[in-house]
Amino acid sequence: MSLSNISKKPISILKRSSISELIKKLLEYNLSRLIVVEDGKPIGIVTEKDVGLFLFSETTRQGLDDIPITKIMKPILFVDESQSPEKSAKTMIENGVSSLTIGSDAELKVFLLKLIL
């Protein structure tokens, strides 16, 4: 079984978006994470966990419409689609992440979640 058979096409959000826009999109599509893109290229990832931790720890008086998602964005981990699901699960554990992206920073193909593995 290949990674592309057990993965999902990601939904993205623009880098210039606010945390408010991020929350709306997560709720609209019932998702737990979104890929951040700039000029059509994937540059980061944001998760509902990132939002929750930010809201819990942030003391700013700024509104969520004024805070860019880049404040909570994390780097993307890319893997080759030929990598086995077992190796992908190991990569997630070693890096403390719950998702990987199949492709490269030039072309994001699909998104792999730990729940799928």
Image (tube, rainbow, N blue to C red):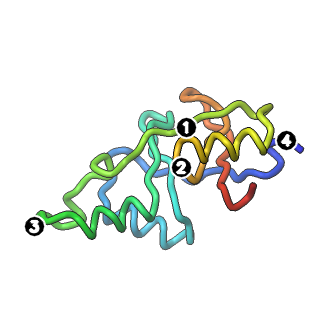
C-alpha gap between disc 2 and disc 4: 20 Å
Q: Which residue is mark 1?
A: 77
Q: Please indicate whether residue 3 sits to the left or right of residue 8 in the image.
A: right
Q: Which residue is mark 4?
A: 2
Q: Quadrant of residue 75?
A: top left
Q: Which residue is mark 3?
A: 61
Asked which secondary structure carries label 1, the reply is: loop
Please state the total of marks drawn on the protein image. Answer: 4
Kind of residue sitting beneath label 2: Val
In the rendered view, would you say 50 is above or below 99?
Answer: below
Q: Badge 1 local density, few (<14 within 10 Å), some, or many (20+)? A: some
**Residue nearest the observer in this picture, 90 or 71:** 90
Which comes before the other along the chain, label 2 or label 1? 1
Which comes before the other along the chain, label 2 or label 4? 4
Residue 71 x/y as whole percent: 27, 49
Of badges 3 and 4, the one in the foreground is 4
C-alpha gap between disc 3 and disc 2: 30 Å
In the rendered view, would you say 32 is above or below 82?
Answer: below
Of badges 3 and 2, the one in the foreground is 2
